[in-house]
Amino acid sequence: MNRVRSRKGAPGIVEVAIRAGVSPATVSRFYNSPDKVRAGTRLRIEQSAKDLGYIRDRMAGSMHSRFSGTIGFIVPTLNNAMFAELADTFSRQLGSHERTMLIACNNYDLDTEIDIVRSLLERRIDGIALIGHDHTDTALHMLSVRDIPVLSLWNYREDAKIPSIGASNTQAAELAAQHLLDLGHKRIAFLFSDTVINDRSRDRKMSALATMKQQGVAVCSDMILDCPYNTGIAKTVATSLLQQKQPTAILCGNDVIAHGVLYAALALGIKVPEQLSVTGIGDFANSADMVPSLTTVRLPAKRIGQLAADTIVAMSMARNQLPTTHSKLECNLIVRESTGTVNKTKQLDKRLK
Amino acid sequence: MNRVRSRKGAPGIVEVAIRAGVSPATVSRFYNSPDKVRAGTRLRIEQSAKDLGYIRDRMAGSMHSRFSGTIGFIVPTLNNAMFAELADTFSRQLGSHERTMLIACNNYDLDTEIDIVRSLLERRIDGIALIGHDHTDTALHMLSVRDIPVLSLWNYREDAKIPSIGASNTQAAELAAQHLLDLGHKRIAFLFSDTVINDRSRDRKMSALATMKQQGVAVCSDMILDCPYNTGIAKTVATSLLQQKQPTAILCGNDVIAHGVLYAALALGIKVPEQLSVTGIGDFANSADMVPSLTTVRLPAKRIGQLAADTIVAMSMARNQLPTTHSKLECNLIVRESTGTVNKTKQLDKRLK
DNA sequence: CTGAAAGCGCTTACAG
DNA sequence: CTGAAAGCGCTTACAG
């Protein structure tokens, strides 16, 4: 026989059964519902499996059992400390439930996401986690037809259409904005990343500007700038901004942008917080240790990742019998050295002479 | 029938075949060897699949075909910009080969790694990529028995036992060390992360110290410190070091540590590079934009990730008929503002008075 | 180029 | 508590 063998040399459930002197069905029960197997039989099967170095074939098993033990996760990119941390925690916590994570990056592109969803469905995932709320009907429909549980992570919204776990990005930006207002700032500049493809960024920007309006602080449109999540580009954008305008504070869409702003200020010799206050959102790894350290809003990545893993596993087992999850985790303002009262910024104009 | 159905509502290959007026075997051929199907038949099948929203079940398919289309990847953690970037690129490139990445973190623990390998094998991976060269025989044996191709990423070594793609961490540290020596530094301190569980760190440390010895520069043992890959801890360690000793340069095991050292110097009022030179390894996202910018050794994460994806896919298809891969990708010294000649450091002692 | 049939490695009612 | 048998959704020689 020239037939291609898939598990060349590796023993299957039949070999384990023969060696243990039981039927394959009993070996299967040993793994899937051990309480239905007598203790003595269990021991023999365990030893037999160990002797042979048996490893289950979950793919074969999943053809009957409906569960593959695999959970999908789609992130925009892993090249983002927050998503990397989230994926790390999510994956670990899934491991504690005997699940494995199948991950893919959509690169902030919803057409790519459709292809990825298809590819994940081809691999029989038991559930899927997505970032944020911007998804195509096509992708969502493919999942709902197959009854695959979907969980939206990261951004909490009251009006979410799918179950979600996250912090409110609206609240996060409001905390940052209110902090700057409390310090007396009125000439505030805003740096946000693309709000078209990113609902987190959109919520943050809307919220920051709404807070300004609410408190009667006018915002000039040329103080609102676009900036990708890239420290180098943020530094360039901020350098140009600081040379042309005289903001007393800059509210940044996330910490990566804020880092760039701090470096720009440092390079220009603008003192933070005496001449300029800077806030971020996210509380990335470096932010606490920079000099000056960054005032920011902490987003609970670890807690989201853990809770998400627990939740998606529960959803996959209960299917539709679970109440819909909408968990809002708290975010906190972390006041550090990069913000101060506006009084300290009197010297600002001097540097321009 | 109360039987649990796995793909409730979703059409299978049989439905597609019926609608297209062909046999299931022909639909299967359409996907797996389209050239064996007549063009007209292809069109009808394609339309039928589209109409029904058919999605293949690769798990069922893999029972025969030996291929699951899934590649495993085990990293120590994703909470590391280099591994996150590597995973991101690897995953994307696998996507272009119609493969999906199954990723898990071993948290720098080799026992955990064994469990992960088992879990990945249960899911029928076509190949697996690991970080570095420190792996248990148990894990490697489970893979070799099943003939699963293994590829070691990140750290190139001549004496590698398994196929590998990476940069030489020995060379990386040598470049950094030689650069400091060329600038005239002799009082050099070293900060490296745990070398027991991390062959990259081990190679870097050995190499840096060997370079010193080669050039006849003595290194006092209290100038060699342990430090995890954590900017905050690095800052603390460096602060204490700088207050007690007077190194003219600090060679750091990676950029994360170097960032902490730069912040420590900044907080202490020590001028870089005038009073202190600092080097990193890795060229992380922030390093080019910091003030002062960091001199470091760039490791080609993107190229490793891409080449790794191409290679593991080729290996999985060719099995043992491929020559063993040992690709050494170049790393480059990037000289920036954080290093300078030792002459500039004359003022060093002043600050201690 | 296409179809009928066997079978991949498991799991699950069913019957004991 | 255990076994024999059917079957999960596909793929693959084999035969036409």
Image (cartoon, coloured by chain):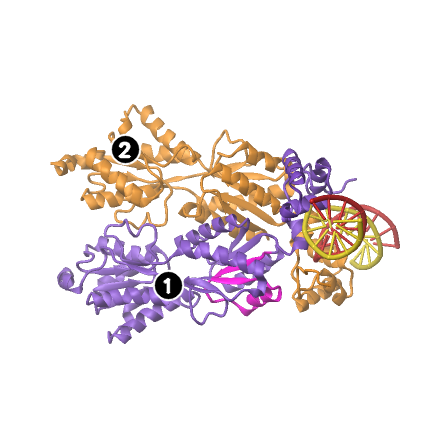
Chain colours: A purple, B orange, C yellow, D red
Q: Report which residue position mark 1 lands on.
A: A193
Whether label 1 touches label 2, CB < 8 Å: no
Q: Residue under circle 2? A: B189
Depicted A300 relative to depicted B149: above or below: below
- Regarding residue B66, the answer to whether it shows in the image is no
Where is residue A39 drawn, in percent x and y?
A: 64, 41
Image quadrant holding the N terminus of chain B, namely bottom right
Q: Residue at x 77, y 40 (%)?
A: A2
- Circle 1 — which element? loop
Q: Percent x, y for residue B293?
A: 28, 47
Closer-to-camera residue (B10/B40):
B10
* Figure check: A161 above or below B224: below
Q: Amino acid at mark 1?
A: Ser
- In the image shown, does B141 or A24 lie closer to the viewer? A24
Q: Secondary structure at mark 2?
A: strand
Q: Amino acid at mark 2?
A: Ala
Q: Is residue B341 magenta?
A: no
